[in-house]
Structures are given as structure tokens and as C-alpha cells.
Amino acid sequence: MKHEYFEKAVIYHLPEIQSTNDWLKLEYKSSKIAEGSAVRTEFQLAGRGQRTNVWESEKNKNLLCSVFLKPEFLSLDKQFYLSMAVSLAVHDVVSVFIPGVKVKWPNDIYVENKKLGGILIENSIMGSTYGSSIIGLGLNINQLQFSGAVPNPTSMSLITNNELDVKLIFSQFLAALFLRYKQLKSNDLCAIKSEYLSKLYQFNQWCKYEAAGKVFIARITEVHELGSLQVETQSGELQYFGFKEIVFLNQP
């Protein structure tokens, strides 16, 4: 299937594969697929999230997809803007169906303190810029039951009490991603950052966190260009954390 937004891109639909991200990586190495090419599957045998976390998904129920991009225009010191743009694209789509959607740092999709989806971005580097990026998305759409291995999952169907069209939501995601990518390419970074912070889960709210074995109260005050999270403690001290260095313990 051809892509509506990237002229030479192709959309693949495969019933079952190991991982959409891994499949696109292999496809790119073997055939040099065009930017914007994407793959969607009904089931992943080895789906994963950030830092090797396992992604649970019932067959034929959810959106499992990956998109191939070449953000060569983006310097490495601006790397987190891609993550922000992708998170906003997912937010754009889900917000059509559900109010109160938030992005939990760095790029999980949350509704009322429950996880609706996750994004996995894998980059290759060429000198001081990106060579390619594979954007993986797992979005819970029609799944109604989850195992106890996932602490706080939800789905669009559970929230709306309706069964939704996965294929349609995939098409809407591609459209939203194209627009956000276009915004990124036009160097509209301030707007992307401002909108990301406005939709950030627990932003500027006093909440409980854990880092390096210590529990403390703090509020998120900034996210930096390389992706580090800045929080302010109750004593006024600013602390900075990379991915997996801080745990969100409670909700406001």
C-alpha cells in the first residue's frame, strides 16, 4: 500500500512478526526503504518498550506499528525534539476520542494515571546528525483484559466503552505524524516544546518520586533538549534525571 504523505513510501501490513521495529530495521538494511515507510501487525512475538521492557498486547486488538524516518536535518543536541513531536502526534490522535490525555516523560501516553500506549524510538547516527530513526508505537485500543505483569494499563475501548477501528486510527496516526514531522522540519522547536510541556503528565505538580534509593517530593519544571528531566525539590534544589533514573511513585 502506498503512503499518502511520503511519495515513495510503502505501508506494510503483516499478520504476525517478531517486532515491527526490528522488521523495519532489517528491511532498511536489505532494500533501503523510503522515508515514511511503515509496518503494522496484529501481533508481535517479541514486542518491547523502552530499555527492553516487554510490551503486552492481545492479538488483533491494538495498534502495533513502526515508521521509518530520516531526520538528517536534526542535530544530535536537539535529539529529544523528535521524541516530543512523535508524542504530540499520538496525543493528537487519541485526544479526538478521549479527553485529558497526557504524555508521561519521556513518551508514554497516559489517561487518568493509567498507561494507554508507549513509544520506542531507535536511532542510527551519521556524524553529528541522525542517519535514520525508527518510530515504534504500541497503543492499546480494543483490549479489555491485561495480565498482572502490567501495573496500570488501560485501553481506548475501556475508556470510551466502544470498539474502535484499529486501521483507521493507524491512518490517523500517520497523518498526525506527518504534520508533526513537518513542524519539526520547519524548525518550529519552541512551539513543539511548549505544547509538549503543556501536555506533560504531572508537570509543575508536587508528587512523590524515587531516585537512587531515595524517596522525595518534587515537581517537574523542565525537559531539556537531550531529554533529561528537571525537577525541583521542596527545598528548591534542581535535580536532573536521564531515562530510567527516576521512578514516578504516586499521582497528584
Image (spheres, rainbow, N blue to C red):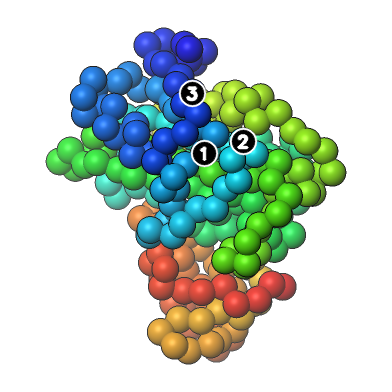
Please identify the quarter of the rendering in which residue 111 is found: bottom right
In this view, the residue in front, 147 or 138, is: 147
Query: Judging from the image, what secondary structure is the residue with disc 1 in?
Result: strand
First along the sequence among labels 1 and 3: 3
Left or right: residue 82 compared with residue 127:
right
Query: Judging from the image, what secondary structure is the residue with disc 3 in?
Result: strand
Residue kind at label 2, given as amino acid type: Asn
Residue 211 in the image, given as x and y percentages of width and height: 45, 81
First along the sequence among labels 3 and 2: 3
Left or right: residue 23 compared with residue 30:
right
What number is the disc on residue 43? 1
The CA distance from mark 1 to mark 3 is 11 Å
The CA distance from mark 3 to mark 2 is 12 Å
Is mark 2 in CB contact (under 8 Å) with mark 1? yes
Q: Please, is residue 219 above or below residue 143 in the view?
A: below
Is mark 1 in CB contact (under 8 Å) with mark 3? no
Q: Name the residue under label 2.
A: 60
Q: Please, is residue 180 above or below residue 146 in the view?
A: above
The CA distance from mark 2 to mark 1 is 7 Å
Residue 31 in the image, given as x and y percentages of width and height: 23, 20
Crowding at label 1, few (<14), some or many (≥20) Cα neighbours within 10 Å? Answer: many
Q: Residue at x 52, y 59 (%)?
A: 105
Residue 32 in the image, given as x and y percentages of width and height: 24, 21
Q: Which residue is drawn at 53% across and 87% down?
A: 215
Q: Residue at x 51, y 81 (%)?
A: 210
Residue kind at label 3, given as amino acid type: His
Q: Mark 3 points at which residue?
A: 13
Crowding at label 3, few (<14), some or many (≥20) Cα neighbours within 10 Å? Answer: few
Residue 171 in the image, given as x and y percentages of width and height: 59, 23
